[in-house]
Amino acid sequence: MDVEILSRVQFALTAAFHFLFPPLTIGLGIVLVVLETIWMRTKDRWYHEAGRFWTKVFAINFAMGVASGIVMEFQFGTNWAAYSRYVGDVFGSALAAEGIFAFFLESGFLAILVFGWDRVGPRLHYFSTWMVCLGGSFSAVWIVIANSWMHTPAGFRLVEAGAAGVDGVRAEIVDFWAMVFNPSAMDRLSHVMSASVAIGGFLVVSVCAYYMLKGRFPEFTRRCMPVGLSVALVGTLLGWITGDISARGVAVNQPAKLAAFEGVFETGPKGLYLFGIPDAEAQEIRYGVEIPGLLSLILHFDPDAPVTGLDAFPEEDRPPLLIPFMGFHLMVGLATFMLLAISLAAWFAWRGGLVEKRWLLRVLVPSVAAPMIAAQAGWFAAEVGRQPFVVYPAVVDGVRTPGLRTSDGLSEAVSAQQVASSIVMFGLIYLMLLAVWIFVLDRKIKHGPDDPKDVPVAEKTASFIAAGALASEGSLAEGELRGDERRRT
């Protein structure tokens, strides 16, 4: 393999591993806010213990997300130096905003969230939960904005690189808010956030279903299962809505990518393939099942409206077909399963008979894999569908910019052998990290929540300041008693 393919494989490996954790922490952050809100309103001690349990799970995933994300930053300088020079002005602004508005907010209150249950008052802890949840969401905002700019660039101009001995151009921001609200940013952001909500909800549902099958922690599952079902159902429904909006945006802004998603070879009225295997050489979908006119109807509300095909683009500008087509259809298929499974579970839970549907509980236990795989499949489809460009061509001030081809974004000093060696090294490290993550998460889940003590929650969560004051008063009183005894003696 050449250095371009190896560098793309390396970045895909590291990014895919990292992408396991941020959506999970965002979704769990929302679950924590819901549980703690109910606890603050009801003072039901089981919601308090549920919050503590899911906070431990949240902390594990947060740590893994931070550790796995560092590697990607180094790759920009090692493997993709020309790309980094091209987008440095854009990414510098977005990532600086992420650090200021998101990371400091999230990390600043994380210690209180994780360790402050018995050390700070309930109101301060509740506020910290909100701040960590918002910090995680803000982090996603700026990362998705930066990534979306690569798909639909806006608010920039091309200038000479300017450094001695460096050829080429770089993108320079001229309108920060146009960069932030580039044509695909809000569509992609809403879809990512919806998927994160669904992932967090499905994790709660999966664990609760496991406990219900085992007959463990009935009070815990009686409170957490409705929360998990509600969050998962809302996230799945929003995922369908935002996914439809996002696909329409792709049809307008990146029609070649949509053609790869749907296997559209020739421009014209098109049906929708439920499944199949694309054959680029034969220009057909093998073993496919097609609903005539449905794709035209979905995109243009007219079954006879033409859909732009791959034939509208030069062959050298066409994206690969297999991964975008299969990834997109896998994502949609899993989203269909998620909607059916969670809707059925919510119906039985509302009727009060979910615990008796053991066959459904057995389906729900591994169901957490569905939104996580769907998110990975959608990401692969979107990123490979952008090829052969790492920064897509765009029209700026009426002039079409050429974009940046992936082959032009590589570092000149890196060899294929060096990249291949690093892939093996990172692969082994990530396998070990994955094993540790699964082991620790499995232990936490099998241990389960702690049983609430008989001490009222309000006393358990008293402020450490108040506790210190009580201790001081006790010491003073004891000293006075001892002084009185000495005087009497």
Image (cartoon, grey):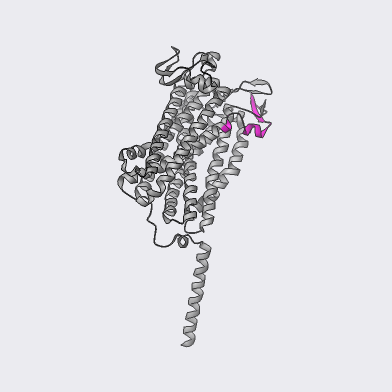
Q: Using the image as rendered, state which of residue 70 and residue 113 is in the foreground.
A: 113
Report the front residue among 386 and 219. 219
Which quadrant holds residue 143? top right
Picture layout, residue 223 above or below residue 184: below
**Residue 221 is covered by the magenta coloring:** no
Q: Nearer the viewer, residue 96 or 335?
A: 335
Q: Residue at horizontal 49%, vertical 44%?
A: 30
Residue found 52% across the figure and 53% down from its top: 126
Query: Residue 96's spot in the image, x, y percent?
Result: 61, 40
Quadrant (top left/top right/bottom left/bottom right) for the N terminus: top left
Q: Compared with residue 456, is residue 199 higher up or lower down, i.e. above or below?
A: above
The question of residue 177 being in magenta is answered with yes
Q: How far from the left and from the top, in percent, is residue 268? A: 52, 14
Q: Which residues are magenta?
A: 164-186
Count all numbered tags in the image, as a single digit.
Answer: 0
- Asked if residue 476 is positioned above or below residue 193 in the image, the reply reads below
Q: Is residue 295 visible?
A: yes
Residue at point 68%, 28% (across, down): 162
Residue placed farthest to the front in the image? 351
Image location (x, y in percent) of residue 447: 35, 50
